[in-house]
Image (cartoon, rainbow, N blue to C red):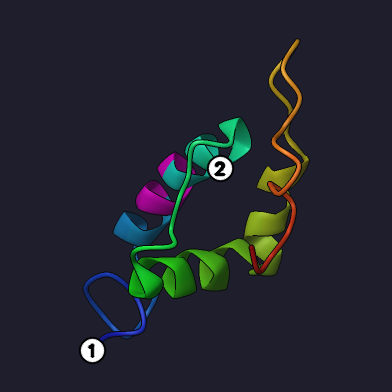
Amino acid sequence: NHNFFIKDKLTHLDLLAAANLSVMDYLGLLDLKKNENIKEWYFKIKSRPSFKTLLKDQIVGLNPHENYKNMDV
């Protein structure tokens, strides 16, 4: 019932988990269709201004998945 993983405020755990999910998202390996709670949480984190700079990062020689920069897919 929390807004974030363990509290109602953002913690290091949220940032660590979001960074890991972001790599999977970048590669097109993230499928959140079966877990609406994680999907809502991830896109809440992903849309934060401080996290948006991460979405500009690129892996040399590997383009991001077409949905990587979308905030609601």
Q: Nearer the viewer, mark 1 or mark 2?
A: 2
Instruction: Give the label on residue 41, or none.
Output: none
Q: Which residue is mark 1?
A: 1
The main secondary structure of the magenta stretch is: helix
Report if residue 18 lies within the magenta region: yes
Q: CA distance from mark 1 to mark 2?
A: 25 Å
On the rendered image, what quadrant is the N terminus found in? bottom left
Q: Quadrant of residue 12?
A: bottom left
Q: Which residue is mark 2?
A: 25
Q: Farthest residue to the bottom: give it.
A: 1
> Is residue 2 shown above or below 64?
below
> Is residue 64 shown above or below 20?
above
**Of the image marks 1 and 2, the number of the one nearer the N terminus:** 1
Residue positioned 37% across, 48% down in the render: 16
Please tell me whether mark 2 sits on a helix, a strand or a loop. Answer: helix
Please provide percent x and percent y for residue 17.
Answer: 36, 50
Please provide percent x and percent y for residue 29.
Answer: 49, 36
Q: Farthest residue to the front: give it.
A: 34
Residue positioned 75% across, 10% down in the render: 61
